[in-house]
Image: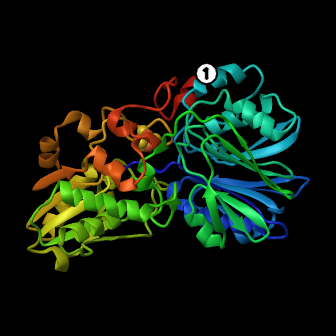
Amino acid sequence: MDKLHEECGVFGVYAPGEDTARITYFALYSLQHRGQESAGIATSDNNQIHLLKGLGLVSQVFDEPGLETLKGDFAIGHVRYSTTGSNHDQNASPMYQECELGPFTIAHNGNLTNTSELKNDLKDSFEFETTTDSEIIAKMITRSEGRTFEQKILSAMEKLEGAYSITLITKDALYAFRDPHGVRPLSLAKLNGGYAVASETCAFGTIGAKRLRDIEPGEIITITKNGVGSHYFPSTKKSFCIFEYIYFARPDSLINKQSVYTVRENLGRYLAQEYPVKADLVIGVPESGIPSAIGYSIESGIPYREGLIKNRYIGRTFINPDQRLRKRGIKLKLNALRSVITGKNVVLVDDSIVRGNTTKKIVGLLKEKGAKEVHVRITCPPMLNPCFLGLDTATEDELIANKMSVEKIRKHVGADSLGYLSLSGLVKSTRLPKEDFCLACFNGEYPFELKDEKGKFVLEKAVL
Ligand code: SF4
């Protein structure tokens, strides 16, 4: 449990005459890395909304007969990691809601930063069934003024603060919208006679859709049988989460027109420039460390080798191990290749150090398998601040960089040297301007005022 946790993945499709539930099902498979605690699909057939959701991986929640019941030309899907609220059945998404314009369901990625304030505002008008901010957004849309769903969404957006990338279906339309800072990704694609929207473009490849563009910060897309329309909520400043490039997004996704894989390779190249070292080989910590290790290798001329093998079939959080078993977790997930690393000086490239336990175990594993020296290189600066915008990071006190200097961390993890990429190296790797990013993990400059008590159980405390 020493890694940042992915937030959520959302998807939406309008495909007349097609099996939209199955399209969504396959798309959710490719977004599974963004959340493994629950999954859900909702479809709409012009009369009714059908919904199926539950705890677990996509493969555990859906089966053939279940998908058959989900009819309609419109569908949305969601995979969830609980960044707000516990991992309970009722907290799974999409969320169903009824308003005077008819029923709708929403799937949300991100975190609001004023949930307590909004819930207080809504509590006299609504009963709450969950402890998620997705339900708050659904109720805000229900209560907002407007003769159309676009108007209601626009009016709700005036009150919502924080990060949200959302897909929503009504009986006869699909909507997709992003908060005005565009913290979480959301893209639009063409699919045969219709359209698809997804947190990441890797989902488009899986279903044969052709990427058109990113949905802009503050943009509301409406998709009906008449085509695509756009409305805008004024966007003041972009604040895209830079961690999507470092760790969360899949390397085959394209965000802000930048390939995530290429950005990760650049991270490794800049690391090699900033922290060169004499070594025999470079290895990456799977998965996100691998393109950066390749970049480090290209820049430094030190050969890249596969030194760590990941067991891909180990579930993440669904079966919660007790503390004793959790300590063994890293060995269940990774093994080191003795034949590659014995007697070698190794550069180990990873995406981040959160609490330090994982890095310490991996360095220990490499030394146990015969590595002579292990030089750790991290593709971002020390993490000093937690995220309140859709990721489950450690608390401020748990972040190792808050408690120790780089030299102390080096000693703690047992590395022979330790280098963190600079903030400027990180930003340069994206080929995008610094102003476009949220960098709060590193510099503490959050794009919004944080009104909520910090923590994912904020709404549960409010209920108690
Ligand atoms: S605080 Fe960090 S993880 Fe959270 S949105 Fe900002 S950059 Fe991303």
Expressed as whole percent of the image width and height from the top left, the position of residue 218 reads 63, 40
Quadrant in the rendering for residue 113: top right
Quadrant in the rendering for residue 364: bottom left
Could you say which is closer to the camera, residue 440 or residue 388? 440
Location of the C terminus by quadrant is top right
Would residue 161 be found to the left or right of residue 391 on screen?
A: right
Residue that mark 1 sits on: 117
> Element under label 1?
helix
Name the residue: 72% across, 71% down: 64
Q: Is residue 155 in view? A: yes
Name the residue: 75% across, 19% down: 124
Expressed as whole percent of the image width and height from the top left, the position of residue 438 reads 44, 40
Quadrant in the rendering for residue 103: top right
The colour scheme of the drawn protein is rainbow
Expressed as whole percent of the image width and height from the top left, the position of residue 252 reads 48, 67
Q: Is residue 392 in view? A: no
Name the residue: 57% across, 57% down: 56
The 10 Å Cα crowd at callout 1, few under 14, some 14 to 19, many 20 or more, is few
Could you say which is closer to the camera, residue 448 or residue 119? 448
Could you say which is closer to the camera, residue 357 or residue 329? 357
Would residue 367 be found to the left or right of residue 316 on screen?
A: left
Expressed as whole percent of the image width and height from the top left, the position of residue 166 reads 65, 46
- For this orientation, the residue located farthest to the right is 47
Would residue 165 be found to the left or right of residue 422 on screen?
A: right
What's under tag 1, amino acid-wise? Glu
